[in-house]
Image (cartoon, helix red, strand yellow):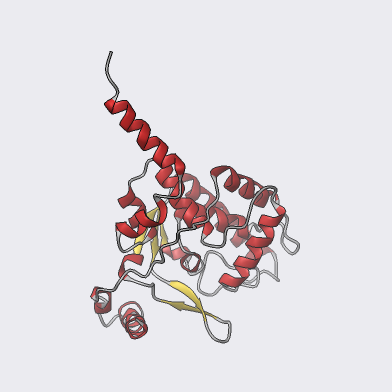
Amino acid sequence: MRYLSVLKSIFHYAVHELVVLEKNPALKVPVQDSVALKKDVKYFSLKELNILLEYMMSYKYQRFPEYQLYYMLMYFLSRTGLRISEALALKWSDIDGNKISVNKQTRRTDNNEVKITTLKNSSSYRTIQMEEELVHELRKFKLKQNEMILSYEGFQINKDGIIFQNYLGNYLTPSTVRDSIRDYCAKAAGVEYKGTDGFRHTHAVLLLESGASIKYVSQRLGHKTIKTTADTYLDITEKIEEDELKKFASYTAKKP
């Protein structure tokens, strides 16, 4: 898997940077799905998520109070289901209308520096659609980001054009995000910290509870198999089981 990851990176560079190849042949190599199956998946209920997002909307940062970076990041994660490493690598150029292309991720080097790498497997490369409200919020955030860059000398622009940059123009690291979100959860009344994957799990659970198909959720999350999605999520929400049982009872009920 380590050798394959290196090969993917080399071919990705050849395709997208050098433009000497049309396709990445390493993506065709079949690999076992490496998404971990978790029995104790932590996620926010819809009520908890709304409490946290409302708190973040009103939170005032010390340096630049109007730059709501973590509100936008949390909202984005909860509406897309992206892995934190995928979200932190996103560029504004990855957005085309209401669609977003997921094709890279961030990793931390031994020197604690951020490195952009290829994704874990071929199914992780995907294009997902965003709802109108999220598109609207992203446009507002981009306008605010550009306004901050133009208005404040201390607010730097990221040379890669990433979406979730800090005011110094740097990439956020997963460890920084984890510590910050844990702190914000502690301040938001009644919201327990669920880890950085909590928003991804929340997105999946809310999709399933709203009636989305398991296949749609699996493709949106970038899972290699539907079984991974089913084994991870179908047994953690009572609402799904209750709704399905009601359908069965209604179908089999004796008609008067």
Closest to the observer: 227 or 7?
A: 227
Residue 193, horizontal then vertical, whole percent: 62, 57
Quadrant occupied by the N terminus: bottom left
Quadrant of the rendered image containing residue 66: bottom right
Residue 69 appears left or right of 42: right
Closest to the observer: 174 or 67?
A: 174
Quadrant of the rendered image containing residue 228: bottom left
Residue 223 appears left or right of 146: left
Residue 14, horizontal then vertical, whole percent: 31, 82
The residue most toward the front is 254
Q: Residue at x 58, y 82 (%)?
A: 112
Relative to 242, residue 128 above or below: below
Residue 154 appears left or right of 80: right
Residue 39 appears left or right of 146: left
Relative to 119, residue 111 above or below: below
Quadrant occupied by the C terminus: top left
- Whether residue 210 appears in this view of the structure is no
Residue 47, horizontal then vertical, whole percent: 58, 42
Q: Residue at x 54, y 46 (%)?
A: 45
